Image (spheres, grey):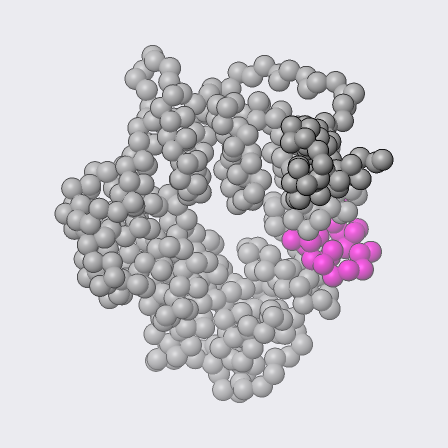
Amino acid sequence: MSLEAEWDDTVQALLVGAHRAGVEPAELLDRCAALGVAAHAARLPAVLDVPPLAAAPASADRRADRAARSVLAQVLALDDQILLTEWCGLAAARGIVAHPRELPALLGLATAHPGLRQAVGKVLGGRGRWLATVRPAWAWAVDGSADGIDLESALDLPGTARTSALRRARAADPAGTREFLTAQFAVQRRATDRQALVAALETGLSAADEPLLERALDDRAIGVHDEALRLLRGLPGSRLAERVAERLHRGLWLTADGFDVQGDELWADREPEPEEARDLLRDGSETGVAGRLRGAAASVPPAHWTNRLGTDDAGAAAELERGPWAAALLRGVAQRLRLAVDAGPWSVAATRTLTGMEQLEMLATLPAELAARTIAEVSRNWNYDLLDHACSQLPAPWSPAATEDLLARYADLRDPRWRAGRPPAVLLTRGDAEVLGAHWARITARWPEQTADLDVLRLRMQLRDAFATPPEGLSP
């Protein structure tokens, strides 16, 4: 009788009872124990004839001390990604890596949440990079220097991995990688592949990349064209900027009421000529007179306006702000603020000109510190919800100056009924911990309701203390 048949007979005997089945109870239980294990117990794992892992290489990395490890344990228990990013940033700034016991948890978290990988990668140290070779899923953390990247093989990688490999190659050898990308652009048949080649130029973008980007503007695929145009717009002194500057001089006049379109010129109410259409996004966002003006303003540096008006950034921003096309022009200029001598007046003018979601969308495109200063400047008449939503878009941690300004804005506003007496969560979790700690009495007086956010702030203050510079002559 087979094992399965014996087990079936035993189960039937159990169901009807030992006496009715004609067996002794003890014997039936013995059979049940033996056959049940044989039929349903897990099998022993197969013996693998592989050598054990080699010992980890020696490392001279400075490891986190007891205080920093204690804070990290609390951060991991909270599963707070913002706090974890802050811990990693402070540790990396002081040349400290995570203790080996925390490495598996950090690798697991960053594998599950790719947004953490850049921060976590800075505190893995030599032991962490060695450990990353143990599991294929952790391969992202293996030392990813660009040396020896096989560009031909990189093209066969999936989307994000391919882009990452191409950009690492660009960082190591801009000229050689450009030659490869140019040659491949001519033979790649899929639009997504050509778009990836163009996107790789963003790393180390320079005037030498302009010929390939100009060539990509003639690509029939929308994604390829728009990616090339996005990069060209960030390239100072490009032929694109020269072409658009000529159109702005020809079609936009300075009147008593600010800049206005010339009625019989290129921005009259008609479709753009092919030459102009080539320099506009094809995603549908730059249609109509306002869209075309926004695209033109996004294609020239802010210096175009200061030179044309013979003034500084503040004066030029004020002039554009008062015209009938202020919203379109300033939204375009806001995309090129990194090229401005003084970006502050431009960002404030653009934010004042826009309303609602347009304001928030524009603020999201600004560098973090500039966005924080702009919010503090233009939010004097905002309500609590609008300020809170705008601040939630600012990456953490905020600078001390931004924290001071935004704390003052929050403190001056009336709390909404549903948050009465409760401190703003985004302020306590993203503001500079040292500044907030210095204002602890003010915060608890203004918002007396005790919340979990205050506990997070206490933990952030502990984090700062854990990485405080030790007295001279003492090691951490």
Evaluate whether residue 169 shows in this view.
Answer: no
Up the image or down, 109 lies above or below 273; here it is above
Residue 189 is inside the magenta segment: yes
Q: Quadrant of the N terminus?
A: top right
Foreground pick, 34 / 345: 34
Find the residue positioned furthest to the top. Answer: 473
Which quarter of the figure is the C terminus placed in? top left
Q: Nearer the viewer, residue 21 or 332?
A: 21
Q: Residue 202's x, y, as percent?
A: 61, 50
Residue depicted at 34% across the width and 62% down the height: 348
- Give the magenta range: 174-199
303 relative to 322, above or below: above
Q: Indicate left or right for 124 with 51 as reference.
A: left
Q: Is residue 375 magenta?
A: no
Horizontal side of residue 225 vs 375, given as left or right: right
Q: Is residue 147 above or below residue 267?
A: above
The residue that appears at 20% across and 58% down in the rendered structure is: 420
Q: Position of residue 334 (x, y in %)?
A: 44, 62
**Front residue of this view, candidates 25 and 296:** 25
Secondary structure character of the magenta stretch overall: helix
Residue 167, image x, y percentages: 65, 44
Would residue 412 be found to the left or right of residue 80 on screen?
Answer: left
Which residue is located at x 56 percent, y 34 percent? Answer: 107
Name which quarter of the figure residue 8 lies in: top right
Numbered-mark total: 0
Judging depth in this view, the residue of 362 and 208 nearest the camera is 362
Q: What residue appears at the point 78 percent right and 42 percent down from the top-left corner?
A: 153
Q: Residue furthest right?
A: 1
Question: Is residue 216 in view?
Answer: yes
Above or below residue 309? Residue 409 is above
Q: Quadrant of residue 441?
A: top left
Q: Residue 454 location, x and y as percent?
A: 26, 43
